[in-house]
Amino acid sequence: QVQLVESGGGLVQTGGSLRLSCAASGSIFSANAMGWYRQAPGQQRELVAAITSGGSTNYADSVKGRFTISRDNAKNTVYLQMNSLKPEDTAVYYCHAEITRRNYVKYDYWGQGTQVTVSS
């Protein structure tokens, strides 16, 4: 089995910063694309940022220039540095990973979600 464990959410004022972490553990052959999604109340889950195992990144237009995604392949961990936070960034943030397990089959996994609240 594979687990994604997130940390780093919380309450911050407008303009502040937070750093999210997500560590994958378990029966992992390799972690492929990893990323962060978010879901605000009454809205659909949306992609925030993603990163391939080679380091190529993709960001939602709304976070470009403010958020930075990175990863440590040795630790199967992905990070999201969030700067210049705005109230509209308030949401539950979910980690996602495409994992190749030791049976060489690819699966999609999700973290449990971490709340990010930005006060105005």
Image (spheres, rainbow, N blue to C red):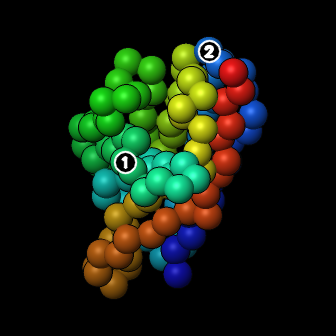
Identified at 42% across, 35% down, the residue is: 70
Left or right: residue 60 versus residue 90 is: left
Residue 110 placement (x, y as % from top left): 49, 65
- Give the amino acid at mark 1: Leu
Q: Can residue 73 be seen in the rendering of this structure?
A: no
Frontmost residue, 32 versus 43: 43
Determine whether 19 is above or below 46 in the image: above
**Residue that label 2 marks:** 15
Q: Quadrant of residue 45?
A: bottom left
Frontmost residue, 17 versus 7: 17
Identified at 71% across, 27% down, the residue is: 119
- Outermost residue toward the front in this view: 42
Left or right: residue 105 versus residue 24 is: left
Which numbered tag is attached to residue 67?
A: none
Q: Quadrant of residue 65?
A: top left
Q: Earlier in the sequence, mark 2 or mark 1?
A: 2
